[in-house]
Amino acid sequence: MTDHIVKAYDDELNTLHELIHHMGEMTVQQIDKAIQSIIKGDEKLAHKVIETDDEINLLEVKIDELAVRIIALRQPVAFDLRTVVAALKISNQVERIADYATNIARRTLMLHDMPHLPLVEGLPALLKIPKRMFERALVAFATHDLNLALHVWHMDREVDELFNEYLTELFNAMIADPKNVGPCTQLLFAAKNIERIGDQSTNIAEAVYTLVTGKQFKESDPQ
Amino acid sequence: MDIKIDVKHLNLFYAEKQALHDVSISLQSHQTTALIGPSGCGKSSFLRCLNRMNDIIPSARCEGQVILDGEDIYARSVDVVEVRTRVGMVFQKPNPFPRSIFENVAYGPRIHGLFKSKADLNDIVEGSLTRAALFNEVKDRLHQPATRLSGGQQQRLCIARAIAVNPEVILMDEPCSALDPIATAKVEELIDDLREKFTIVIVTHNLQQAARVSQKTAFFHSGYLVEEGETGALFTTPQDERTQGYITGRYG
Ligand SMILES: Nc1ncnc2c1ncn2[C@@H]1O[C@H](COP(=O)(O)OP(=O)(O)OP(=O)(O)O)[C@@H](O)[C@H]1O
Ligand SMILES: [Mg+2]
């Protein structure tokens, strides 16, 4: 798309994209650190994740403020309007994903006095697809890539399958030894948070779909 | 919905120069249609075709049909004066007659004999000025020359003059370009009001105004009707790249 006649308008829209990019990058780091902390039982790292969440919340506020400012001062229409609306939605979804990372870090602290379970090693494999979905959804937004957005949307099915398998393993461990119930419950919460990262990423993909096509996403639509 | 004016394959020439190219559009009754597009794209020219105002320009020649309630206004049998009464116009530049404020509004009802008594005429004048959001500002000087009004007041006077004769269609060419935000809001409110009885076509360079007042928007470019559609759709999801470029303020 060509530039606006008013350059400052382009600058503001670019800033909006940059802020979301930055927020996304930070959130990916938060997810990685949270998983590391839970696998290694690294409480210092877990605390670090929990503290950093504030910075991400602030970024969301910044994006909101800039979006409202653009609406008030530029009265965006058409693709520009859809960009601002998508940015508002996506920043909200990224913020939620960052919350999931924080929740996982909290599990690290809860697991402190509990017996170590080898099942915790299964979390990175579980995270692989949701994290990739998240990263790709952000790229799809930055590049207005409809196909990539649809691809992300389809990936969610794989997440569900892996999640159900992991759940079965957790239940088996609990049945095998009641002492496992405590740590397994924490891992169950962590796994659920990972699964939600995938769900939120499909929401981002849907926002990109609307941005590019101007239509609301319907499950029956995508091929 | 009823079609009030059906424009079919309209071409307009000023001498050799073609100003409109094969324009076809249906204007619905009780709707406001906004015409937008870059300066010189033919909006005013198109508007003038709708009530044969181009007849006044010697070099102007048009082809195609403009069908008002089923009848082509360019047909030989049609009375031009009647067309212009049914299809009223507010011009881009305010053009009050060099007469009093009262006479400017009373002129139309007088020549068409639209009133029964002096009181009746007073009512028409007051009502028209009120609807055009001007009455309060001029009620103490109705018999002073209209030319002493400010530019924005003159524009509202011309709106009052246009609605005083109860037209069926009102064509407005940038009626608010000289108005402050309050007067603009009042005129927009008036447009919404008038829509219940009339059909309105408005040319505006103010895209937010087009979005606010109209149900349909048509985008013109270099004498071509590029895109027309429901206003909400056109401003959120324009179909043509040129429309997108124009309404978002990009180089087209
Ligand atoms: N009386 C005329 N004689 C010759 N050419 C004319 C006449 N009126 C308009 N034109 C030409 O026709 C084209 C369309 O003009 P028109 O006034 O319809 O544009 P517009 O869209 O109303 O522009 P603006 O937004 O500046 O009012 C222009 O190229 C203009 O120069
Ligand atoms: Mg004009």
Image (spheres, coloured by chain):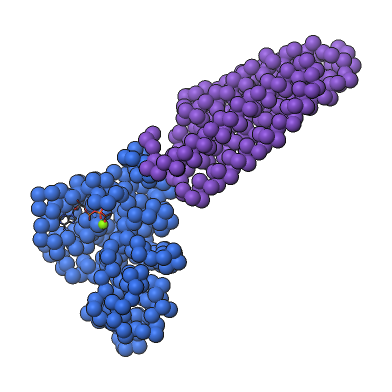
Chain colours: A purple, B blue
Which residue is painted at 22% across and 60% down in the image? B48
Q: In this figure, what is the number of numbered marks?
A: 0
| Position in image of residue B135 (x %, y %) | 40, 78
On screen, residue A176 versus residue A206, left or right, reads right
- Please state the quadrant of the image where ligand 2 appears: bottom left
| Position in image of residue B100 (x %, y %) | 28, 82
Foreground: B65 or A46?
A: A46
On screen, residue A124 versus residue B73, left or right, reads right
On screen, residue B116 versus residue A61, left or right, reads left
Above/below status of A123 relative to B234? above
The quadrant where residue A35 appears = top right
| Position in image of residue A221 (x %, y %) | 49, 30
Foreground: A98 or A42?
A: A42
* View extreme (bottom): residue: B118
The reply to whether residue A158 is in sight is yes
Above/below status of B23 relative to B145? above
Foreground: B126 or B116?
A: B126
On screen, residue A154 versus residue A9, left or right, reads right
Which residue is painted at 76% across and 22% down in the image? A45
Pick the quarter of the image with the N terminus of chain A.
Answer: top left
Above/below status of A158 relative to A81? above
Which residue is painted at 39% across and 52% down in the image? B207
| Position in image of residue B38 (x %, y %) | 29, 49
The reply to whether residue A219 is in sight is no
Which residue is painted at 23% across and 55% down in the image? B46
